Image (spheres, rainbow, N blue to C red):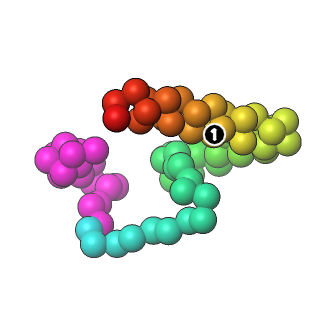
Amino acid sequence: MPEEAAESYAETNDDIMIVQEIELIHESGGASIALKKGNDELTEYINEIIDELLEQGLIEKWKAEAKALSDQEIKKNN
């Protein structure tokens, strides 16, 4: 998200703050989902779906497909 949009969003939402100059490293590269604090039912539901996707191998499949598409675009643009 561009910095201006993030700052505007943080200004209008008291429960959000901007943290700069922090680097989060995860070996998988990762992705994230933001949920309102205290929304335990939705958090549990999303975690169940993620577990199912992992068990079915779909996340790895989608990552491989995304990489293949990315590689195609890189080759096409070089």
Q: Is residue 46 visible?
A: yes
Q: Is 4 placed left or right of 52 in the picture?
A: left
What is the x, y in percent for residue 19?
29, 66
Name which residue lies at 29% across and 60% down. Answer: 17
Instruction: Work out whether residue 73 or residue 46 is closer to the camera in this orientation and state it.
Output: 73
In which quadrant of the rendered image does the C terminus lie?
A: top left
Task: Identify the residue at image location x=64%, y=45%.
Answer: 43
Give 71 or 44, whichever is nearer the viewer: 71
Q: Residues within 10 Å of mark 1 (few under 14, many from 20)?
A: few
- Examine the structure image and report whether residue 14 is included in the region drawn in magenta: yes
Which span is picked out in magenta?
A: 1-19
Rendered image quadrant of residue 5: top left
Residue 9 drawn at (x, y percent): 23, 45
Rendered-image quadrant of the N terminus: top left
> Is residue 3 left or right of 69 when viewed as pictured?
left
Residue 34, magenta (yes or no):
no
Q: Position of residue 16 (x, y in %)?
A: 32, 55
Asked if residue 42 shows in the view, the reply is: no
Please give the residue where the numbered disc 1 appears in the rendered image. Answer: 63
Q: How many marks?
A: 1
Residue 75 x %, y %:
43, 33
Is 47 on the left or on the right of 36, as rendered?
right
Three-letter code for the amino acid on which mark 1 is drawn: Lys
Residue found at x 85% / y 42% = 55
